[in-house]
Image (cartoon, helix red, strand yellow):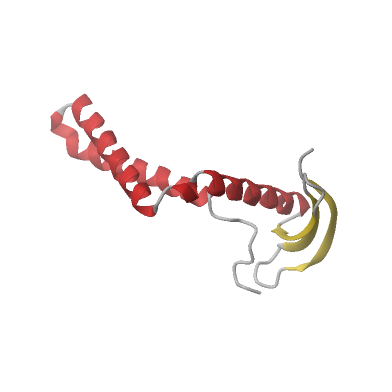
Amino acid sequence: MKKKAINVVYRKDSESFPDWLKYEVTILSEDGEISKVPAYGKDLQDALSRVVHDDKVKKIEKKVLSKVSDTGWALAWFLGMTISIMSVYLAIEHRYVGYYVIGVMAIYTFMTLSISNWFSLRNVNKRGK
């Protein structure tokens, strides 16, 4: 059995973000524990998908992300950047190497920021209200 949403109660419209709603979701976990979680979204489906997303992020953080130090992540990022640039440098004509290196750096940075954005928790009240 996986977690189940057994009850959802509409709380209020968001004052900070127009067209957003706040729900309170009652969740039955695998071990039979019942917990209440606030959920924010444009509709009920959006709010529930944010609750599921946050649960996935917390599982991955517990298993993987918390076991590697910040220094380790920084070294891995620079190693990946170095390997990407070296691969492009060796594979292309040297006349346009600057353009390709800048392109690789931009793409690698964009991918890193996209992954980092995915790991940010979505189901939180952004303004503290």
Which quadrant of the rendered structure holds the C terminus? Answer: bottom right
Q: Position of residue 21 (x, y in %)?
A: 74, 62
Relative to residue 95, is residue 49 drawn left or right?
right
Q: Residue furthest left?
A: 95
Residue at image position (64%, 66%) is: 125
| Residue 103, visible in the rendered structure | no
Residue at image position (72%, 59%) is: 39
Q: Position of residue 4 (x, y in %)?
A: 80, 46
**Residue in the foreground of this view, choosing between 93 and 29:** 29
Relative to residue 30, is residue 68 drawn left or right?
left
Residue at image position (62%, 45%) is: 56
**Residue in the foreground of this view, choosing between 91 and 119:** 119
Which quadrant of the rendered structure holds the N terminus? Answer: top right
Answer above or below: position of 2 versus 38: above
Answer above or below: position of 56 versus 97: below
| Residue 110, visible in the rendered structure | yes
Q: Position of residue 15 (x, y in %)?
A: 70, 73
Q: Position of residue 104 (x, y in %)?
A: 30, 38
Answer above or below: position of 85 versus 46: above
Residue at image position (56%, 48%) is: 62
Relative to residue 78, is residue 126 drawn left or right?
right
